[in-house]
Amino acid sequence: MLSLLKGRKILVTSHRDPDGDCIGSTVAMTLALEQMGFDAEALNLDEIPYRYTFCDPYRLIYSMNSIPDREHEVAVVLDSSDLHRLGYEMEREFPKVKHIINIDHHKSNEKFGDLNLVDETAAAVCEILYGILKQWDIDWNDQIANALYTGITTDTGSFKYESTSSETLRIAADLIDYGADINIIRTSIWENEPYNRIHALSNVLDNIKLSEDGRISWIKISLEEIERHQLNNGDLESFVDYPRTITGVEVALFIKEMEKGQLKVSVRTKSCIDATKIASVFGGGGHKRAAGFKIKGTLDQEEERILKVVQEEVDKEYKCMDSLI
Ligand code: 5GP
Ligand code: MN
């Protein structure tokens, strides 16, 4: 990997609508490369949600408008199963990029890089990066430790999901020794809710739905509600965890009207169903327990169609689910 990076201007980037893993891995990779004397810049198409800004104290992550130039020759693409997830066209925006290093943990990764470091057993890209930075023998500091810990704790649902291995916990323990501050991380990410977000959540939960068999629960939000509550990028993250907590629910969905005629759906599953199977029917992807997809259409038109597909998938797996009762 270092031979691909040496002497070249490096772009570190990850998927749009950035989450904790993609912000943490972007910051940690950029800081490590800078420390080693490489010329690296970080980019994300969308704004960093306020709850993750603590992770990037030096404001390393540029937006497309603020990046100083487009002279980068090699790109490190993080946490993205395919290049479309970046939300911009690499070839058009960065025509000098001749090499791509793809570091990811999505099962559906398309191996689009010249070097593909894809480990679907890793709980987070930040877990993979921990291994790489150990090999590079960097000087560990609070910023790198905080960034990597953030990615791991958010992608594992605070070490709750089955992707959490004993190795995940050992890495997290090391990161605390290297200076990760769990008080700052917790208060920034989970105890930092603006009032309007909680108000929106209460409205959304007022209309929560449950399928007849009790195995699917879903919530939705319209563009009008997003605007009325003045919700920003990232404000809707984790709403979908609420329908999943219902006893007996196997699939939880959150249908969001992000733009006029454009829906984004988050899919979460509990035990029997692979969430990527549902997302892939609509051209999306993700992980076994958390996946997503985007489709064109309005809430009224598409809600029923989506539910029909999910119900079919649930019915196929009913034997597995009955064995859990
Ligand atoms: P979320 O629902 O939190 O946005 O995403 C959950 C998981 O599904 C993440 O791992 C994310 O990368 C993946 N995901 C979300 N939306 C899409 C999509 O439109 N396409 C693909 N391939 N993956 C998605
Ligand atoms: Mn991730």
Image (cartoon, helix red, strand yellow):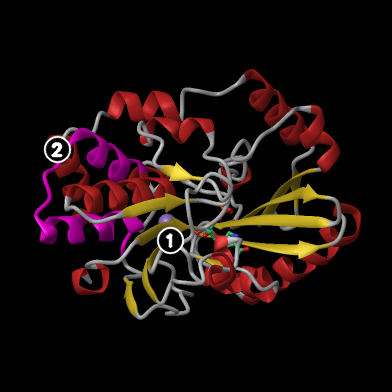
In the displayed structure, would residue 206 be above or below residue 128? above
At horizontal 54% and vertical 46% (from top left) the residue drawn is 63
Please tell me whether mark 1 sits on a helix, a strand or a loop. Answer: loop
Quadrant field for ligand 2: bottom left
Is residue 159 at all visible to an observer of this figure?
no
Q: Which residue is mark 1?
A: 79
Labelled pair 1, 2 in contact (Cβ < 8 Å): no
Magenta stretch in the rendered image: 122-150
Where's the N terminus, which quadrant? bottom left
- Give the mark nearer the N terminus: 1 vs 2: 1
**For the residue marked with disc 2, what is the amino acid?**
Tyr
Q: Quadrant of residue 243?
A: top right
- Determine the residue located farthest toward the right in the rendered image: 301
In the displayed structure, would residue 16 be above or below residue 223? below
Q: Which residue is mark 2?
A: 178
Q: Main secondary structure of the magenta part?
A: helix
In the displayed structure, would residue 152 be above or below residue 54? below
Disc 1 residue lies near ligand 2 with CB under 8 A: yes
Q: Quadrant of residue 123?
A: bottom left
Pinpoint residue 108: horizontal percent, then vertical percent.
Answer: 48, 75
In this rendered view, identify the residue nearer to me: 96 or 13: 96
How crowded pointer 2 is (Cα within 10 Å; few <14, some 14-19, many 20+) is rated as some
**For the residue marked with disc 1, what is the amino acid?**
Asp
Pinpoint residue 130: horizontal percent, then vertical percent.
Answer: 21, 54
Pinpoint residue 47: horizontal percent, then vertical percent.
Answer: 57, 41
- Horizontal relation, residue 193 to residue 37: left or right: right
How crowded pointer 1 is (Cα within 10 Å; few <14, some 14-19, many 20+) is rated as many
Pinpoint residue 110: horizontal percent, then vertical percent.
Answer: 47, 79
At horizontal 60% and vertical 63% (from top left) the residue drawn is 88
Please tell me whether mark 2 sits on a helix, a strand or a loop. Answer: loop
